[in-house]
Image: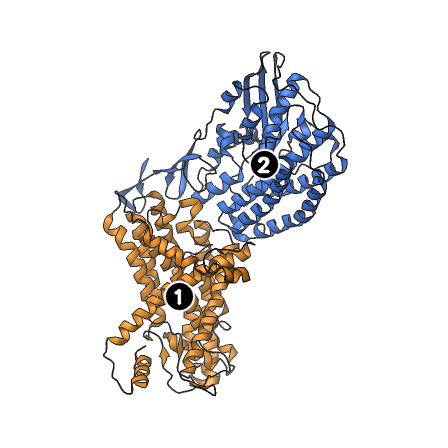
Amino acid sequence: MEPIFEQFVRDLTGGFQVPFWAPMLVSLGLVLAFIALNAMFMIWLERKICGRIQRRMGPMLTGPKAWARFSMWTGGWFQTPCDSVKLLLKEDIIPAQVDRFGFMLAPVLVFMAALAVYVPLPISSTSYAQSAPIVVAVADLDIGLLYVVAITTLTILAILTAGWASNNKYSLLGGMRAGVQILSYEIPMLFALMGPMVLAGSLSLGDLVLVQHAGLFGVPLLGWFLVPSFLGAVVYLICAVAETNRPPFDMPEAEQELVAGFSTEYTAMRFAMFYLAEFSNTFVVCMIFTAVFLGGWTLPGFIPPSSLNLGFFTLPYFDLLAGMAIFFAKAYAVVLLLMWIRWTFPRLRPDHLMTFGWKFLLPLSFVNLLVCIVLAAIQQIYFGGNPG
Amino acid sequence: MMRQFPANPDLTVEEFELNMGPQHPSTHGVLRLVLTMDGERVVRCKPVVGYLHRSIEKMAENRTYTQVIPVTDRLDYCTSMTSNYVYVMAVEDLADITVPPRAEYIRVIMSELNRIASHLLWYGTFALEVGATTPFIYGFRDREKVLDLFESTCGARLLYNYLRIGGVSRDLPEDFCERMLAFLDEWEPLIREYEDLLDENPIFYNRTKKVGFLSAEKALAYGVSGPNLRASGMARDVRREHPYAVYPELEFDVPVRTEGDVFARYRIRMEELRQSARILRQCAEKLPGGPYLEPQPLRMVLPEGETYVHLESPRGDIGCYLVSQGTDKPYRCKFRTPSFCHIAVFQHLVRDCLIPDIMAICASFDVVLPETDR
């Protein structure tokens, strides 16, 4: 964020030097706004997709009537804002018997984790034809991938806290299930991500994308880690869905079994925090998948110019904008895949989930790692250096 | 019960009680299960029924024979027609009334349509209990079309009050058979669609196969009936064993499976949907003309005596024991409902299961609480 922001302000004001804290504040604001708006859109989209799969129309009554008349995809646009306002205005109930500190801490913790995970996610860069492209991220950490995995685990800590503090047996069971789930899925997920790490020789998400663009064995499309590390991609996606507690892995909040699981006792804004964090985490998963396996903001054989001449107007930062558009298009494609899975699958049973995680996904991720090591070695020996 | 924690003898592990219901998203009404749990594992399960008791049997004793019919609607809100039917059949048996053939056919059509509606509702809720949301909508979408047929016949969509002593309250609408056949043509291929959503899904398969096994002996001992009994390998069907109405003239199979698990109970109901459609097609073909009702006095007096009749409701063997003392009101009207037996046996099946299995097993029995409590 810093270099891009500084350059942007310099360009705009003609040489103004921004104070060191400005980029941080701006990126915090941007991420917060993004989480809220994107979650709203995703919830709307989810309900529409769900409606389409179930042969109904989803929300249609809120928003401009004229739009709703046009097609099911244009109706009900104001549904999520209305729901959010409703959640904001609801009474905040803290049951008498709960552990107040933990009960109040959990939603904050879960949201904190959801917020912090955005730090290393790269959404675009200045033209990557240059030798040193500047990556657009809050901060392109050198250990980005490790950071992301570490932070997302915090969510489970919050859910465990919520389950314990709620003083409700259903909540406790939900929290425990979440704990079990993360134990079974964190490890295969890490191993699945190690494939791309080996191939790229870096943990920085920005580097991962640039390496993928460079291609494997000199072939650009092969470079998308989805291809050499296909098993890893599958394992990662399954584990990531499990980690965000989305169906079919929503045992911690399985309605038919545990009422609402860990969030049973939560109301109003505290509940909204869990909800928001869940959707935010889902999108983060899709973003990571895009960056690690789908080549991030790049397309094979396409390098956008740094500015686009539209004749009457020259669009600056075109490389940045095109990158973002490509990145979000890919991320939303993954979101759609997750939604499709969500609305067609029954829920797993906790013990099946563990069997699946330990006995199937973990060996699979080892195989993937092995394949990636071999490919990286071939690349090293015959094509010189890491793919990048 | 306390026991020591294996890894650390200083710690003890304690079982805890989980009170599931009466207000719980998936207890199908107001069933309360008092579960003794060891973590996620069920040690004991004690079902508590009675939250929906409306003293229907007592109410029946204070109403004339005709007035009882709308009360029987409330026995089982998913299949009002068969509840109507069993009561009306008991009265007719006691009063020795012969029902016109057209009325018999109409009654069979209504029972089978109601079976379809009930099984579709079951399919939706069962899938919902194992965590799949989409089948729920599919089931309800098509149930709606059955309800439309009912609505055009008797004006009601849930509590029909359609059958009368001696026939049915009104004739079928003129185009009923065409509309019914059109519905069947459109809907029968959709059964395949329901199955596609669940059958070969490994998650569903793992969650239902070898879960909630019910042996034939135990099923018989507890009076389990209907699809649940047939899933345990017993080819018992009242429509076959004690044929009533026009069932002897109709061709249909009684699907049987031997596994006795949740999956078998699911498959049986899916097969029954097809068989019901088959029966309906034959009925539409054979439906005779003539009167639809043998009119009876509004305040009819039955001769002294008692009778027990039973028939095959979507849930199983529903019976009505009717005692008359020669007045215009039943002296005793006792209903034998299948769901009650199913809840009784259900508590033995969930032992050592996990919480998600409770839902799957409970749903697979197609328990309807108003019928249990009466």
Quarter the N terminus of chain A occupies: bottom left
In this orientation, which residue lies closer to the viewer: B192 or B86? B86
Quarter the C terminus of chain A occupies: bottom left
10 Å neighbourhood of mark 2: few (<14), some, or many (≥20)?
A: some
> At label 1, which amino acid type do we have?
Val
Chain letter, colour orange in render: A
**Where is residue B352, by image quadrant?**
top left
**Where does label 1 land, which residue?**
A284
Q: Find residue B157 and report its horizontal and vertical position in percent.
A: 58, 38
Indicate the chain on which mark 1 is placed: A
Q: On screen, B88 above or below A347?
A: above
**Where does label 2 land, which residue?**
B156
Report if residue B246 is visible in the image.
Answer: no
Q: Find residue A332 and report its horizontal and vertical position in percent.
A: 47, 67
Report if residue B142 is visible in the image.
Answer: yes
Q: Residue at x 42, y 40 (%)?
A: B24
Colour used to depict chain B in the structure image: blue
Q: On screen, A155 above or below B328?
A: below
In this orientation, which residue lies closer to the viewer: B144 or A328? B144
Q: Find residue A199 and report its horizontal and vertical position in percent.
A: 43, 76
